[in-house]
Amino acid sequence: MELFLTANLAPIMFGALVVFLLSGFPVAFSLAANGLFFGLVGIELGLLKPELLQALPNRIFGIMANDTLLAIPFFTFMGLILERSGMAEDLLDTIGQLFGPVRGGVAYAVIFVGALLAATTGVVAASVISMGLISLPVMLRYGYDKKLASGVIAASGTLAQIIPPSLVLIVMADQLGRSVGDMYKAAFVPGLLLTAMYAGYVLAVSIFKPSHVPALPLEARNLREANGNSGAVSLLFLVLGAVAASFAFAKVYGASHPLLAADELGIFSAGVGIVGSFVFALANRHLKIGLLSRMAERVVFVMIPPLALIFLVLGTIFIGLATPTEGGGMGAMGAIILAMANGRLSWSLMKQAMNSTTRLSCFVIFILIGSTVFSLVFRGVNGDLWVEHLLSSLPGGTTGFLIVVNVMFFLLAFFLDFFELAFILVPLVGPVAEKLGIDLIWFGVLLGVNMQTSFMHPPFGFALFYLRSVAPKEVKTSDIYWGAIPFVLIQIIMVVLIIAFPHLVSVEKKVDMKEQIELKIEAPADYGTPAEEEKKDDEAPALNFSTDTDKK
């Protein structure tokens, strides 16, 4: 028995962790208790030395000193302030009016606002609850299919997991030892593509089952001109003007700064267009110019403040002006300023946001402390080598590894949320992926899209529970579950697309700055005679340093 335990302690330890987690015991304490128990077993069996556990205090202090993790409370606080200050309600009402005449217009508005909230909040619960309270009654009132309405709201809320400033990407970057800014850049295109795929599904439903997604009736569209026009024409001209201003700035500024990176130029140009539109709308309102319709003015004043916050936070991170932690601090301050400008900042709002932020931050830190206890002992009993051998010997090479890992994450996401998956499994599979030559930024984004399903699939999808808590009684739990399934399939298709077309995730190729230096020791030739041999012993060998560049 002792020999069996000694030879198989790592898989037994991992299996015991699964049993702990399925028993319903809190995750952080399951990890820590499992690690300490098997640490004592390993010491008793002679596999570990007692000194190993003395490394725990230093590891815990390392977690407390990790600046990257500070971005989590900053972005959480920013999202909660924006959500509770009424920004989501204003956005949904305005964009719903804009898309109202189109079949499925409210569903498009929910997807668009979900992406916008994801880029400003990064919190799934805030997005799902806000849109469930505001949009679901409207969609049901005007005849939307219950399953489609529920699925659209739940899926759009989960976009906060992949569109920066996503909390899961921060954790993923920390666990994989990569830059949060690089992870944000890499996840931007997949997040937008996933948003487009959601909208494509709504478009398909509007074509094949138009009764499921009716347009808003005329009496529900209250942002109209006195003559009955929608006012969309002036909004179109304003958008075209903003695009023209951005394009002209890009041409002029790009010509004078030829070494400027394309993404930085794009951020500067978009900022010029957005600021120009806001200034023009302000002038139109205060100078009574009358060039913009009510719809155009409302869209500008509701959408541009959160867009400006997105550019302030993500733009400074992308161009390297701020770290993610500094960007999160600016975002939190910007959210307070926006709430104050709208007259919605109160002590009660601040207190609720700070309480929720503290709870989430403590939750993350305790899981991280538990996972570091588990990983220390697991590596001590050579568990990392067991996992590496298990995954690297799979048939199919790299593709087989990616398929098995994604299936494993997908199945475990039925029972665990993304924090638990990121802290328990990512440190185990990340080193194997790196040894197989997989870029860890790309790998992190792939797993981020996969773990997004943990919020969506029954029976334990948190987004479904959030929506259930605010949905009217006529919406059954089965409607919410069935409505989520098409969007889970879309997310699986997105995972397949990333594996099949890796360039969808933009990963910068880093230049290896390590110069290869060759050290040649040339021994003197054999002199032959005894006198010459003595001379050879007195001479120092000639050292010849050469680099790769010398060989060209």
Image (spheres, rainbow, N blue to C red):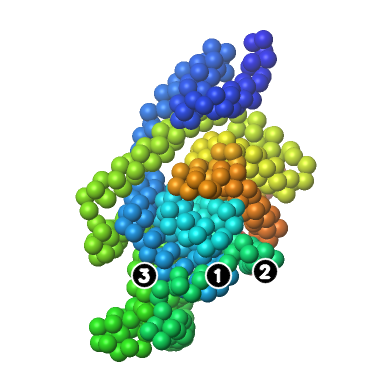
Q: CA distance from mark 2 to mark 1?
A: 13 Å
Looking at the image, which residue is at 67% across and 55% down?
A: 493
Which residue bears the numbered disc 3? 302
Q: CA distance from mark 3 to mark 2?
A: 31 Å
Which residue bears the numbered disc 1? 215
Is tag 3's residue or tag 2's residue first in the polypeptide sequence? 2
Looking at the image, can residue 222 be seen?
yes
Residue positioned most to the front: 219
Looking at the image, which residue is at 46% across and 18% down?
A: 50
Looking at the image, which residue is at 41% across and 66% down?
A: 93
Amino acid type, mark 3: Val
Foreground disc of the pair 3, 2: 2
* Disc 1 crowd, CA 10 A, few/some/many (<14, 14-19, 20+): many
Whether 4 is drawn above or below 290: the answer is: above
Looking at the picture, tell me which residue is in the foreground, 244 or 459.
459
Foreground disc of the pair 2, 1: 1
| Quadrant the C terminus occupies | bottom right
Mark 2–mark 1 contact, CB under 8 Å?
no
Whether 375 is drawn above or below 264: the answer is: above
Whether 144 is drawn above or below 455: the answer is: below
Image location of residue 183, percent across then percent down: 50, 55
Image location of residue 355, percent across then percent down: 30, 42
Looking at the image, which residue is at 62% across and 62% down?
A: 212
Which residue bears the numbered disc 2? 207
Foreground disc of the pair 3, 1: 1
Amino acid type, mark 2: Ile
